[in-house]
Image (spheres, helix red, strand yellow):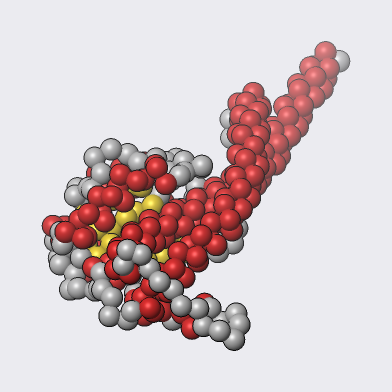
Amino acid sequence: MGSMREIKQRIHATEKTSQITKAMYMVSASKLKKAERAIVRFRPLTRRLGDSVARVIENDRELSHPIIEARPPQHTIYILVSSDRGLAGPYNASVFKAFDAHVRKYHDSPESFTVAALGYKAFSFAKRRGYTLLNDTVIQVRDDISFLDFREITDLFIKDYLSGRCDRVVVFYNKFINTITQRVEADTIMPLDKDALLKDVDDIDDEGPYKRIYHYEPAPDTVLAQLLPMVVVNMLYGMILEAKASEHAARMTAMKNATDNAKDLIKDLRLHYNRARQDAITIELTDIIGGANAVN
């Protein structure tokens, strides 16, 4: 350990760092509450869209559309949802680790997939790995992200899927469980599972003794073609909201741990400072007593 002055400077610097991490913890806690409210407000829209699609398909089980028809995967588009900034613990690294493991297991060459990066960290990761990117520029995942922020990339991968240039779209993101737990998920948003859409269709209109009959204009297949891309975009937006809540929770946990570690370090440094001060006092007393004895 250094001199008393060096120890005191380290204590002062660590206290400043502790104040910063504590402030970041409080900011992340506030943003987490807003993100949780956004998730709760958005869920009814997703549920309504799913119900609408289920009604159209239930009306005519023979209806077909590429988005609900699975085909052998020859080329896959992977959407990686990350943050724009760091200091969030393992939030970004866990997504990249899960994606690397998935690629090693299911792909022999990088030509069989394309990466769409949402967030600066995901964009940098894909660039370092040399993956083919769907987007040429960074798409920032802001705290108040809206549909317009990623509209361009959704149009691109939906167009590629409908034209047959890709056969599957999978999203890697952190699903928010609670403040302590965030789980990496890999969910397929295209093609949609037709059976899953129809699973609860019998309960949709089970509100009375009469069964509702819907008539669609101009035609059910036209309505379905309009609804299915909306469902895909809304599913992706819901996953981004989950990822934002997970990011704030991870950063809040990381900043709390950093603050606690700073407090422990300050405690140790003060102990070393007091010991060094006591040693200095002992040396001074020894010199004074020695000088007095020499004079006598």
Q: Is residue 292 left or right of residue 33?
A: right
**The quadrant where residue 127 appears:** top left
Residue occupying the point 38% across, 58% down? 230
Q: Quadrant of the N terminus?
A: top right
Q: Quadrant of the C terminus?
A: top right
Count of numbered labels shown in the rendering: 0
Residue with the most extreme right position: 296
235 or 45: which is nearer to us?
45
Residue occupying the point 53% across, 56% down? 42
173 or 228: which is nearer to us?
228
Residue with the most extreme bottom position: 209
Q: Can see residue 153? A: yes
Vertical placement of residue 41 versus 194, above or below: above
The image position of residue 195, as x and y in percent, is 36, 80
The image position of residue 11, as x and y in percent, is 65, 32
85 or 202: which is nearer to us?
202
62 or 196: which is nearer to us?
62
Vertical placement of residue 291 versus 16, above or below: above
Residue occupying the point 22% across, 60% down? 161
Residue occupying the point 76% across, 29% down? 282
The image position of residue 62, as x and y in percent, is 27, 80
Q: Can see residue 279? A: no
Q: Is residue 40 left or right of residue 108?
A: right
